[in-house]
Amino acid sequence: MEASINAVEHLLQYRFKDKRLLEEALTHPSYADSPSYQRLEFLGDMALGMVVSNFIFLTYPSLDPGQLSLLRSANISTEKLARVAVDNGLFRHFRHSSSAIDEKVTEFVMTVREEDEAQFYGGAIKAPKVLADIVESIAGAVYVDSRFNLENLWLVFRGLLEPIITLDVLQNQPQPVTMLFEYCQKVGKKVDIKHRKNKETNIASIYIDGNHLVSSSSEQKENARLHAAKAAIKKLAYEVVDKCSFEFDDKGNEGAKRKLHELCAKKKWTKPVYSLESEIGPSHKKKFVCSVEIGSTDATFFRVGGKRSRVLSALGDKKLRIRDAENSAAYAMLCSLKDENAI
């Protein structure tokens, strides 16, 4: 425990006046003959919520309460805090007497390390709550040790919570269930999500206009729902691609860009102009978002949502390479033109 206390203090760049607080914060209830982290976890949950609320309130002065709540929830969710425990190695330093915890934590750590990108809304497996509890209990210990100073807690914990989930990041990775309903509402389709249980497994099935589309299962009901929504969005996206009648895949072929270039030449529109809109994530896992713009060179107009415009733009999805991000933007433009009956 002494080695763990020293390691966590070094990680936090904070020296505890009362090291017993940190020892308590790192002790699971299953560990006998020692106070557990439960009281500190209760306090840390509240304190982290406050400092994150303060941060987003000051950072986004024009956001409404609903958007502020979404940002706060994303930054202090069980999923996010469990990943904080993994990314910073905190999972190595808490003591317990449960083999089941070891199995769940080990499986989660391995899954997170194999991911291409961080998941905000339920990864491949359920995040162990014990990992989030440890982060909250350490926050509670810092809060108490610093005489209940929220400013000091934020100074200590902001680096630990990086990368902070910002509004831009949240908008680029919207909640899958919300995205599914918004898309289907836009194209006039009805969504129905049904849940059932098979022993310890929760199964979520998604029906579009009464027809079964996909199902997904998980120990956790919410994860089953999220995974089913992700699968539904992916399947619907493929259907959209088919309707656009051109070849394109996410692996980076030039089908979408070439098709858009040929279309612009045929219609005598301006050549597509691609722009890099954002770079997301750490350097070793950076993803790119590109946009594309085309324009009319004569007296004709594009029809966009019933309105006329001489310029059209479209935004692509996040991709690991700029070339793929440009393809994604071209794909979005082609589908938009198809929807507007412009091609």
Image: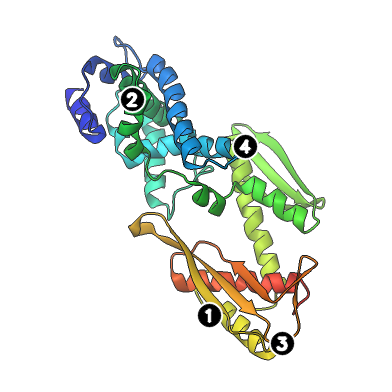
Q: Residue at x 30, y 32 (%)?
A: 156
Residue 144: horizontal and vertical position, in percent? 33, 17
Of the image marks 3 and 2, the number of the one nearer the N terminus: 2
Q: Is residue 136 above or below residue 195?
A: above
Which amino acid, mark 1? Glu
Which amino acid, mark 2? Ile
Rendered image quadrant of residue 263 = bottom right
Q: CA distance from mark 1 to mark 4?
A: 40 Å
Contact? badges 1 and 4 (CB < 8 Å): no
Observer-nearest of 81 and 166? 166
Q: Secondary structure at mark 4?
A: helix
Q: Residues within 10 Å of mark 3 (few under 14, many from 20)?
A: few
Of the image marks 4 and 3, the number of the one nearer the N terminus: 4
Q: Is residue 59 above or below residue 276?
A: above
Q: Secondary structure at mark 1?
A: loop
Q: Residues within 10 Å of mark 1 (few under 14, many from 20)?
A: some
Q: Secondary structure at mark 3?
A: loop
Of the image marks 1 and 2, the number of the one nearer the N terminus: 2
The N terminus: image quadrant: top left
Mark 3 — residue?
298
Q: Secondary structure at mark 2?
A: helix
- Left/right of residue 306 with respect to residue 73 in the rendered view: right
Mark 2 — residue?
138
The label shown at residue 66 is 4
Observer-nearest of 151 and 100? 151
Q: Residue at x 41, y 35 (%)?
A: 82
Residue 31: horizontal and vertical position, in percent? 32, 16
Closer to the observer: label 1 or label 4? 4
Mark 1 — residue?
254
